[in-house]
Amino acid sequence: MDLAEIFRQFGPAYREKFGDKMLPSHLAAMKAIENCRTEALGGHLYFCDHCNEHWYSYHSCRNRHCPKCQHQAAEEWLEKQYQLLLPVPYFLVTFTLPSELRDVARSNQQIIYNLLFRSAAQALQEICADKRFVGGQLGMVGILQTWTRDLRFHPHVHFLVPGGGLRDDGKQWLASRKNFLVRVEPLGKLFRGKFRNALKKTPLFAKLNAAVWDKAWVVDSRSVGSGEAALKYLAPYVFRVAISNNRILKVENDRVTFRYREGDSGKWRTVKLPAEEFIRRFLQHVLPKGFVKVRYFGLFAPGNRHRLKLAQALLPIPTAHPLPPATECQTTAPLPLTSPTCPTCGKPLTLLNAILSTARSPPH
């Protein structure tokens, strides 16, 4: 049992019940996942002369929320990030939206997620510009994540940050302490203030309970080791979808059972949800079409790559290491379309014919 099969089995009833209220991005994701690597998307038919067997290779949907389609993208992203690495300790700084903002965020994803990115990045750069912490310009890679391990809605942004910054004149690298980047209490207050000021410029500000501005906003900062280790840690956050197929255990009596690992204890727990609730939880993590969930700030911003080169020139040349594969890989990939070999005997396959797509394009 996988996500696609759950959608095929329970999706029609879900769309019948909620279709007029569903976002186009949710409808598109469901349709793409249902059709992924099936005859509906077309593909190719091969034949093995040695085994006398036929093999079908169907096309992937390439939807970024599909558990079957993200492994290769993660590998390609890792290769590109290696060029940005600096030979210094790295930190993971996480900014979380308080619970009072989550209903508004769920209904206004573009506005709230953009403000979350911008306010968090500005607060982190501003406080680290203080000489008590760094005193220079940071490099930041920000990744949006909206879920907990049991699929609840919990929007937060992870920032991967090298331990130090470039002085304004570009002539010195200012290192942070090895295992400490910034105090999170003042950072949380600054983040809250910047978000509040930005939200005031939108009609959404009036919809919030004013008490949210009096509570502490959660920010976490922790050391994650070298750049290579940091990328290995972060890559799954970039391309992981809300749930992978290997966490879905069974579907029985219209209820979906899946597992998750507790963050603190590392123990596996199981959750059993009605299929309708499982689909609802999954779809609330589907992002708007075209929304960019990985963003670069400071030295890593595309317009500042010249300053990144200055920083790289001031630091020792890192030892080259092959990047580790992204963790929590998804499901087996389809047969490759170039020079495929038989999964049984390994002999070259013969292409018999192409299979045309029978699915209509998903809605946008």
Image (cartoon, rainbow, N blue to C red):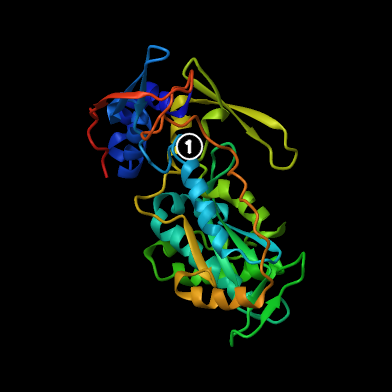
> What x and y, as percent, mark residue 282?
46, 37
> What x and y, as percent, mark residue 44?
30, 27
> What x and y, as percent, mark residue 218?
64, 59
**Amino acid tagged 1:** Arg
Q: Considering only vertical position in the picture, is 71 above or below 343?
A: below
Q: State the residue lying farthest toward the bottom.
A: 169
Q: Residue at x 54, y 58 (%)?
A: 81
- Seen in the image, is 32 located left or right of residue 314? left
Q: Residue at x 57, y 46 (%)?
A: 236
Which quadrant holds the C terminus?
top left
Q: State the residue lying farthest toward the top.
A: 52
| Residue 313 appears in the figure | yes
Toward which corner of the image does residue 37 lie, by quadrant?
Answer: top left
Q: Residue at x 49, y 72 (%)?
A: 197
Q: Residues within 10 Å of mark 1 (few under 14, many from 20)?
A: some
Which type of secondary structure does the marked residue at label 1 adopt? helix
Query: Which is more toward the observer, 28 or 48?
Result: 48
Query: Which is more toward the observer, 86 or 204?
Result: 86
Q: Which residue is mark 1?
A: 281
Q: Residue at x 67, y 53 (%)?
A: 229
Total tally of numbered discs in the picture: 1
| Residue 195 appears in the figure | no
Query: Which is more toward the observer, 147 or 241?
Result: 241
> What x and y, as percent, mark residue 177?
76, 71
Q: Considering only vertical position in the picture, is 201 above or below 323?
A: below
